[in-house]
Image (spheres, rainbow, N blue to C red):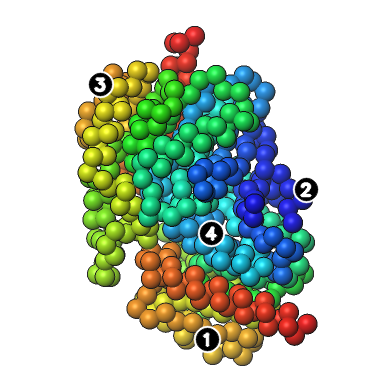
Amino acid sequence: VTEQALLIETSAGTIAAVVTHPNETPRAGVVILEGSKGTRSGANQLWVRLARSLREDGIATLRADYAGIAESWDGDVRDIVGGARDLALWFAERVGDIVIVAECYGLTPARSLCREDLDILGVALIAPPLYPDRALPARPRSWRHRARLALLRLRSWRLARRARKAQDLAPGPSIRGVVERAPTRIFAGDRDACFRPLEALLPELQQIGSVDLEISADLRLHRARTPEAQAAILEGVASWVRQRVRSVQETV
Amino acid sequence: LTDGARNSVVHAADVRHESLFFTSGSDQLYATLYSPAKARVRLGVVLCQAWGAHGMTMYGWCQRTGRDLAAAGIATIIPHWPGTFDSEGDPQLLTFDRITEAGADTVAAAEQRVDIPAWGVVGVGIGAAAAALLTTTLPASRCVLAQPALDPVAYFAETERRSRRASLGAPPNAGWAFGYPIPPGLRAADTAGRVDAALGSFAGQGAVVRYRKPTTAPSPAGFDTVTIRGHWGRPSRDDRQQLRRRATRWLVRSLGQAA
């Protein structure tokens, strides 16, 4: 048996997880942080297939539902990040070196993990939550942005909350925090909303850490809604993770 | 690697929650088992999930339904069908025959862990068609169909059409909908007839729990109909709590009547 179903206690409550592991001692571990609307198996078992593919290379994988969602319904949905962090710490204690694979919203818990004292070999970000300025204003950079945000706050509590959420999702701090901490590969399709903002942000990110961008032509990787997008994520992420684990361990 | 970790916990309301892998054919299938931790089990049910994107959106609903039923003394096992979610198998090769085989193995896996005096089935969406077919192989005394889609051919054709519209001009992938393959074996022309025949020959107590809108075909003969205010097609803010509660209530009442 190389897959085990687990129910793990965290600060956010009980979290349902599946660990896929090789028969021998794992060379490294991968923590998968899915998007906010997903489950731990991914669209059409995308994360299951990734975990089983990495198992062949001696790499263990942890997949879990976020607290309060799907099978982790007993967890506190307000503390998704804390639950994911505790779970990843539990896993890292057992496997040592880890690689983080974060899709879309997964960037938020990934950033939180990057603050911990962990041996992180790399971070793969898939279609991170970046939006063109017009769709979702990031940080209030000019007086116009500030005025708009102030207006939103005046309108209603709900709109104000949404605006604050938009600020929390602001790409700058999250991605910078990840890139500063570990080598990062960003996967995106040229049909993703994050594609243009990523292109604009890349030179700045490359000054603060090791980061590169892998673009899939004519595809939208967000939520992996097509077989082509699923194949691009699976092949791209699996080969990058293998390469990272191999290169770091050969150096050591 | 996973020493010291558990696969079973007891939640509030004395509901035991167990995650497990079991063997079915050549595959390892995943299932979640909810059972009363202290009280006697009055009934066991197999909760049949839907497939594809719909299965994904109703996944949390199924888990909460399992919890509610277990709190009422009804042990509930929720299998992941071959090739879906955490189970092994090829999703393209899935057929209703394979599902009924997996259903029987699911029952065996539950009986190894909990004493279950009688069985029933619950199905949601297209999972209701699987639940209906399971009644032919399981000694099921109860059958609850939540917002059922009992004609797989029509259901998958509609899902494919909606996916095409949602892709907004992207090249369509035949046989796929919302990023999930539609198993050709589930679209066989005779499936609706098999489902009708299974429901026609079902001798136990049954109910259809559904939203008032959109209007659908009448319930199978001999089945109670429980109607909920609202529209199935509209997004729900409370994870379709009413659908869950009414299905649970009907099952509990049916047990009370039998007693």
Q: Residue furthest front?
A: B26
Residue A232 lies, with reference to residue B134, above or below; the image says: below
State if disc 3 and disc 1 touch (CB < 8 Å).
no
In the rendered structure, the answer to whether residue B69 lies left or right of residue B50 reads right
Q: Callout 2: few (<14), some (14-19), or many (20+) C-alpha neighbours within 10 Å?
A: few
Disc 3 residue type? Ala
Give me the chain letter of mark 2: B
Secondary structure beneath label 2 = loop
Please tell me which residue is depicted at 78% across the width and 82% down the height of the picture. A252
Report the mark closest to the observer, 1 or 3.
3
Check the residue under mark 1 and report the chain it is in.
Answer: A
Amino acid at dot 4:
Val
In the image, which disc is placed on residue A202? 1
- Neighbour tally class for label 4: few under 14, some 14-19, many 20 plus, Cα within 10 Å: many
**Above or below — where is B137 with respect to B53?**
above
Q: Nearer the viewer, residue B136 or B223?
A: B136
For the point 48% across and 71% down, the residue is A233
Q: Nearer the viewer, mark 1 or mark 4?
A: 4
The spot of residue A8 in percent (x, y) is 69, 48
Distance between the alpha carbons at the discs numbered 2 and 4: 23 Å
Circle on res. B4: 2
Whether pointer 2 and pointer 1 mark residues with C-beta atoms closer than 8 Å, the reply is no
x then y, percent, for residue B89: 47, 52
Secondary element at image label 3: loop
Of the two numbered discs 2 and 1 in the rendering, the one whose residue sits closer to the viewer: 2
Label 2 amino acid?
Gly
Q: Residues under labels 2 and 1: Cα distance?
A: 43 Å
Q: Earlier in the sequence, mark 1 or mark 4?
A: 4
The residue carrying mark 3 is: B221
For disc 4, the marked residue is A48
Classify mark 1: residues with Cα within 10 Å, few (<14), some (14-19) or many (20+).
Answer: some
